[in-house]
Amino acid sequence: MSREPRAPAGFEAIPAAVHHASTVVFASVADMRARHWQQDAVYTYGLMGTPTTVELERELCRIEGAEYCVLTPSGLAAIAMVDVALLRSGDRVAIPDNAYAPNRELAHSMLAQWGIETHLYDPLRLAAFPNNTRLVWLEAPGSVTLEMPDIPALVKAAQAVGAVTALDNTWSAGLAFQPFDHGIDISLQALTKYQSGGADVLMGALLTRDRNLHLQLKHAHMRFGQGVGPDDAWLVLRGLPTLALRYQQHDRVARELAGWLTTLPMFEKVLHPALPTSPGHAIWQRDFSAAGGLVSVIFKDTIHSEQVDAFVDALQVFRIGYSWGGPVSLVMPYRLAHLRSLMPWPPETHLVRFAVGLEPFETLRADIAQALPHLDA
Ligand SMILES: *Cc1c(COP(=O)(O)O)cnc(C)c1O
């Protein structure tokens, strides 16, 4: 870990230092003129970074094998930053049908206003991208229905039309999948999830090995004033030393839970990439070294939405809420018909997503077991 000098001589400690600054002062006019935003770890103004944010960028690059990193105030801000940096009027952006829903919504609302067309694609059915596709989004797996796409094959199809590829790699935390070894141009992390690990901070990151792409992202980041605060950067830095351990634990318990859920009669299907019946399982096995903490279940169609809601309300350890990657397990019911265009699900399909926290498996199993009778209400 490369550290910035941070304290008077005689004091050294393990934690990162928090450097607050709006103004960065220069030694001389010549010094001020010599510094430029395109240089990395050269300080010009607080919005452009402080040693605390630079330290976080370097750590994230090390984890994922990237060369460059831009931090954004949320994962969604990182998605928007890629779109505004790379897309021009008349371009097309390809988005998987099972993408993180706000990614699609941004494309269908604001990008459409700016003359950028959206090409939705089924990530499980390989087809050529239209010729004017400038950017192909990928997500592995889809964060609600957990289908695992064939990333190298999609990268090939994107390269065939000269498109840049951006992978939302949040689920793997950059640990279970190495995007740049599989031809991805830009990797996106919602640091809000596993990297933070505390359910207490919002942040995103855009990682790349390509200096030219990095400068395009960094330019958009500067023009839109999307800096992150040093205290938030410090919260994420604080989570990183335990990231791999926590990820292993989320993974282990989620697999135990997924296995147990498959034995219960009320579920039509349990979705988790490590289950052989989950879509894209063989691809996950080929390309990934681990799985995250998400497990989704689809209820049999004899179960109605009021029963599903009563079941979710009856859970006590699993709290109802968006996001994942924190210490407390979360649960969220979804009605898929509203979320999909190409991969149609019958309107009566009820899905519940569990995001496994850091509680023991037995605690989570018991919580679901005590809530199941509410399905019969
Ligand atoms: C949460 C999430 C995001 C957005 O992150 P925020 O920091 O909440 O804006 C993007 N992609 C995926 C897959 C996510 O789960």
Image (cartoon, helix red, strand yellow):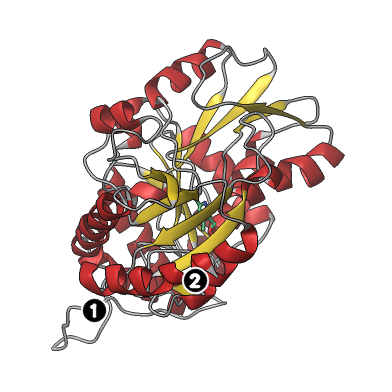
Q: Earlier in the sequence, mark 1 or mark 2?
A: 1
Image quadrant holding the N terminus, namely: bottom left
**Image quadrant in which you'd find residue 17:** bottom left
- Mark 2 neighbour density, 10 Å: few (under 14) some (14–19) many (20 or more): some
Q: Amino acid at mark 1?
A: Pro
Q: Disc 1 and disc 2: Cα gap in Å?
A: 47 Å
Mark carried by residue 124: none
The answer to which of 209 and 291 lies nearer the viewer is 291
Q: Is residue 256 above or below residue 165?
A: below
Vertical comparison of 159 with 294: above or below: above
Q: Quadrant of the C terminus?
A: bottom right
The residue tagged with tag 1: helix, strand or loop? loop
Are dots 1 and 2 in contact, CB under 8 Å?
Answer: no
User: Can residue 367 be seen in the rendering of this structure?
Assistant: yes
Where does label 1 land, which residue?
Answer: 15
Q: Residue 374's mark?
A: 2
Q: Nearer the viewer, residue 207 or 146?
A: 146
Q: Position of residue 156 (x, y in %)?
A: 45, 15
**For the point 65% across and 28% down, which residue is it?**
342
- Circle 2: residue type: His
Labels in figure, total: 2
